[in-house]
Amino acid sequence: MEDLPLYVLLMVLAVLLILSGFFSLSETSMMAINRYRLRHLAKQGHRGARLTVKLLNNTDRLLGVILLGNNLLNTASATLVAVIVATLFTHDDFALFLGTIAVTFAILVFSEITPKVIAAAYPERIALTASYVLTPLLVICYPVVWFINLFVRGLLVLLRLKPQQGELQQKISTEELRTLVLEGGHFIQNKHQSILLNLFDLEKITVDDVIVPRNQIEAINLDADDDVIHAQLLTCHHTRLPVYRERTDNIVGIVHVRKVLNQMQGGKITAASLERVMRKPYFIPSGTSLFSQLQLFQENRKRVGLVVDEYGEWLGLVTLEDIIEEIIGEFTTQAPTQPSSFIRESDGSVIVEGSALLRELNRKLDFQFPLDGPKTLNGLILEYFEDIPEAGTGLNIAGYPMEILQTKHRIVKTVKIFSTALNTKVKSAGE
């Protein structure tokens, strides 16, 4: 080799560095490629993606052939530089030292750092292209790689390590999926992103978070006069109504108003006719997650459920529409006689019903009330005081100054929440 011209040796050195750079490119791009995007391309029939999937399913072999080629080429480069130095400077030790530094610098810049930075920036493009070269190379070098991997496996056994094969099938948690959706904001429409994020929350949210309290539910008393029942059905603003007897917590059925009116054909509706067409009530245990309840609604072909606590006490009502609204946002219209749960004042403050759900206030008014305790504003205030406060009492919860306007029947009926500009006008309840 010493007889070869210097320019030939330098050309060979440049080729060795370039080939070593290829293996560095391949290693980084294969490890950095988006596995889910890769799997999608493979399902679409992309040949390079399919080859890459096969290579990544055998990571030990893939890394074996890459590192084998990379180290052989780097070693050959160092040996060739020693030959060049020996040719130019005979056996000068200082020249050999400088040559070692020069080849180390060249390997780092041209065969390691630069290729890996490029591969990290364009992993998909490089990995799919490199797979066409690595696949046949893995077949050719398989005996050598297999022999080397014998020692690798033996060392792993001594270290009591058992790496999983086929890491392409990585598991991903719900929180990681949420992060992917949030980071994919440039590629996902805002509405679609919001729906996906709401879906992740269905496991955390329970029926208690979206329940319509019992005192706000329109129900029919079978013990009432037929004229009263008839008038109530003709003027109600809901399609499905609970039916009770004697006490409001003694629910005996659910009636579909439209079906009742169609069957009566304009005739008078009586308690007896309602009993013939009403369906059995469907009860839901308190604390059921919305995701589970959505599945149960589908399996049982129900649209309305009555939430009961551990003692069998009827707490309120949840509908399929309530769950869907948690996913896609509010879409149902409000009954004309049903007042809004909040009223905005000209000074920026808001008058809110005590029965308003905290989740609804957070969503509609952009508040940040805690959701890990009581579900309603009334419950939050009662928990804060550990007593039933009187009208006119001021307090500050979660940084929101408010004043109780009305209490009735042991509950807080209405509350005025002040704007941040009026924080100084209301003293904290602890002052």
Image: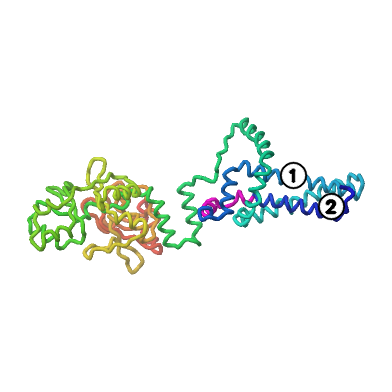
Compute the Cα span from label 2 to label 1: 17 Å
Q: Are marks 2 and 1 in contact (CB under 8 Å)?
A: no
The kind of secondary structure element at disc 2 is helix
Q: For the point 22% across and 44% down, which residue is it?
A: 313
Residue extending farthest bottom: 346
In the image, is 335 to the left or to the right of 196?
left
Residue 10, position as x, y percentages in the image? 83, 54
- Magenta span: predominant SS is helix
The kind of secondary structure element at disc 1 is helix
* Circle 1 Cα neighbour tier, 10 Å, few/some/many (<14 / 14–19 / ≥20): few
Q: For the point 42% across and 60% down, which residue is it?
A: 192
In the picture of the structure, the residue carrying the numbered disc 1 is 72
Q: For the point 62% across and 41% down, which residue is it?
A: 60
The magenta stretch spans which residues?
28-40
Amino acid at circle 1: Leu
Front-lying residue, 266 or 392: 266
Number of numbered labels in the structure image: 2
In the picture of the structure, the residue carrying the numbered disc 2 is 9
